[in-house]
Image: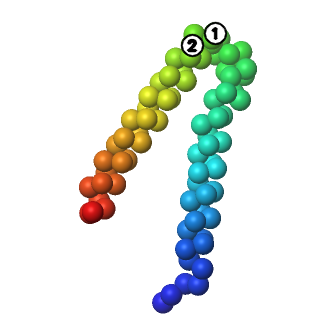
């Protein structure tokens, strides 16, 4: 059974996932004032949080790229 317009639905869902991902990544900057008050973070602690998040995000991209290369045969 062929679904009409399936490619456009997939493109739309990928775009939506990209937007949600971008919002999630920028959420740390938006939450900073409340985090600093609630948890007693100073600017150094905030820098550590951002650095750990960035390193983890990059490692996840590397791992998912390797998995994709294994799954999708060229």
Residue at the spot of label 1: 42
Q: In which quarter of the image is residue 68?
A: bottom left
Query: What number is the disc on residue 73?
Result: none
Point 56% across, 59% down: residue? 14
Residue 72, compared with residue 38, is above or below; it is below
Give the CA distance from mark 1 to mark 2: 5 Å
The image position of residue 12, as x and y in percent, is: 62, 64
Q: Quadrant of residue 5?
A: bottom right
Element type at marker 2?
A: helix
The image position of residue 4, as x and y in percent, is: 58, 84
The image position of residue 59, as x and y in percent, is: 39, 35
Label 2 crowd bin: few (<14), some (14–19), many (20+), radius 10 Å: few
The image position of residue 45, as x and y in percent, is: 57, 13
Q: Which of the colour schemes (rainbow, by chain, secondary structure, one colour) is used?
A: rainbow
Q: Extreme bottom residue here?
A: 1
Residue 44, compared with residue 19, is above or below; it is above
User: Depth check: 68 or 30 in front?
Assistant: 68
Element type at marker 1?
A: loop
Residue at the spot of label 2: 45
**Count of numbered tags:** 2
Label 1 crowd bin: few (<14), some (14–19), many (20+), radius 10 Å: few
Point 60% across, 72% down: residue? 8
Q: Do the residues labelled 1 and 2 touch (CB within 8 Å)?
A: yes
Point 57% across, 10% down: residue? 44
Point 48% across, 90% down: residue? 1
**Quarter containing the C terminus:** bottom left
User: Depth check: 65 or 53 in front?
Assistant: 65
């Amino acid at each position: 059974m062929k679904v009409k317009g399936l490619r456009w639905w997939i493109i739309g869902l990928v775009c939506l996932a990209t937007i949600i991902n971008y919002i999630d990544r920028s959420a740390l900057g938006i939450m900073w004032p409340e985090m600093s008050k609630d948890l007693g973070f100073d600017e150094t602690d905030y820098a550590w949080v951002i650095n750990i998040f960035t390193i983890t995000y990059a490692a996840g991209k590397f791992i998912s790229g390797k998995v994709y290369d294994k799954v999708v045969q060229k």
